Image (spheres, grey):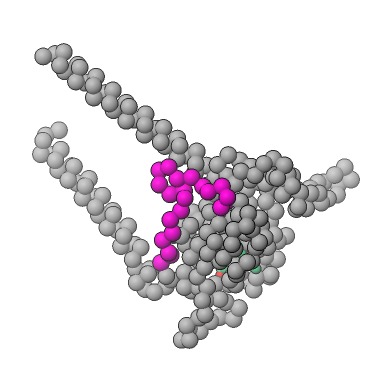
Amino acid sequence: MHHSSFKKSVLGIVGTLAMAGGLALASVAPANAAGEYKAPRDISWSWEGPFGTFDRAALQRGFQVYKEVCSACHGLKFLKYRNLGDEGGPGFSEAEVKAIAAQYQVMDGPNEDGDMFERPAQPKDTFKYPFENEQLGRLANNGAYPPDLTLMTKARDGGADYLYSLLVGYEDAPADMTMQPGMNYNPYFSGKQIAMAQPIYPDSVSYADGTEATVEQMAKDVTTFLHWAAEPKLEARKSTGFVVVLFLVILAGLLYFTQRKIWSDQH
Ligand code: HEC
């Protein structure tokens, strides 16, 4: 490759990256400029950054909020009860996981007589879905379907920041806004009218560890729990990433010295 064409292609790559960056920024701006919804608050989360980990206590409190509040309407279909004891998760003991599962009745069968039967859930079972089917879920919620929350922090722009903002963001609707019947005003929701009524109020739960259950605290905890649900391998991924980077740094150092040695030998 000629020198100049090399330079050109480097410039080309840099230019393309700059353009892509510009486009990415541009694509975020118009939605907000149009006033369709408010940009989520910027929260600092314990799992951010290359060494980020989940706060174990927050995960356990967040599970409590999910269990006592959100699970009345929302499922977590990609989680099994035993995941609550997995490494990198809330870290419940085996006995605790068994006790949690046993609080739910699940359908099993058919038995030898061809009948379905109910039994207490076990750690191997999937989190119990609150409604028998989607239609009943809608009927109970004014026609709106409460979506599964397992991948929610990944499915929405703004991720965990959005989820937190949504939970703390309920307000009275501005006087000039016409609200649809049964809808609630929330500036962070696309369209600002959401079928879910404000789910958490001060002291909606009474925390086992004595933490004060403010709306912000519960929103932060349940968002932490749901982010773990969406990415249960986050901690493992980050520590693997660190080892890989360390390996590459060492390899680069070795290559550098080897190359110096080879070249100095030739002179
Ligand atoms: C009484 C039922 C009910 C409860 C309890 C409830 N939700 Fe919802 N939720 C809904 C319904 C219905 C929707 C669909 C709203 C819509 O599409 O307008 C929804 C939607 C959502 C969404 C999706 C918003 C989006 O961007 O589409 C999230 C996230 C959510 N809920 C989180 C929670 C969390 C976290 C809790 C517990 C703290 C909770 N919900 C408790 C009924 C409920």
Say whether residue 51 is left or right of residue 228: left
Residue 40 among magenta residues: yes
Q: Nearer the viewer, residue 73 or 247?
A: 247
Relative horizontal placement of residue 204, taking residue 230 as reference (left or right): right
Q: Which residue is farthest bottom?
A: 175
Percent position (x, y) of residue 32?
A: 37, 69
User: Magenta segment, which residues?
Assistant: 39-59
* Residue that appears at 39% across and 74% down: 35
How far across and how far down the image is residue 148, in percent? 60, 57
Would residue 211 be seen by someone viewing this image from the given angle? Answer: yes
Residue 80 placement, left or right of 228: right
Quadrant position of residue 264: top left
Query: In the picture shown, does residue 143 fall above or below 96?
Result: below
- The residue shown at (61%, 43%) is 91
Q: Is residue 104 above or below residue 39?
A: above
Location of the C terminus by quadrant is top left
Q: Nearer the viewer, residue 13 or 246?
A: 246
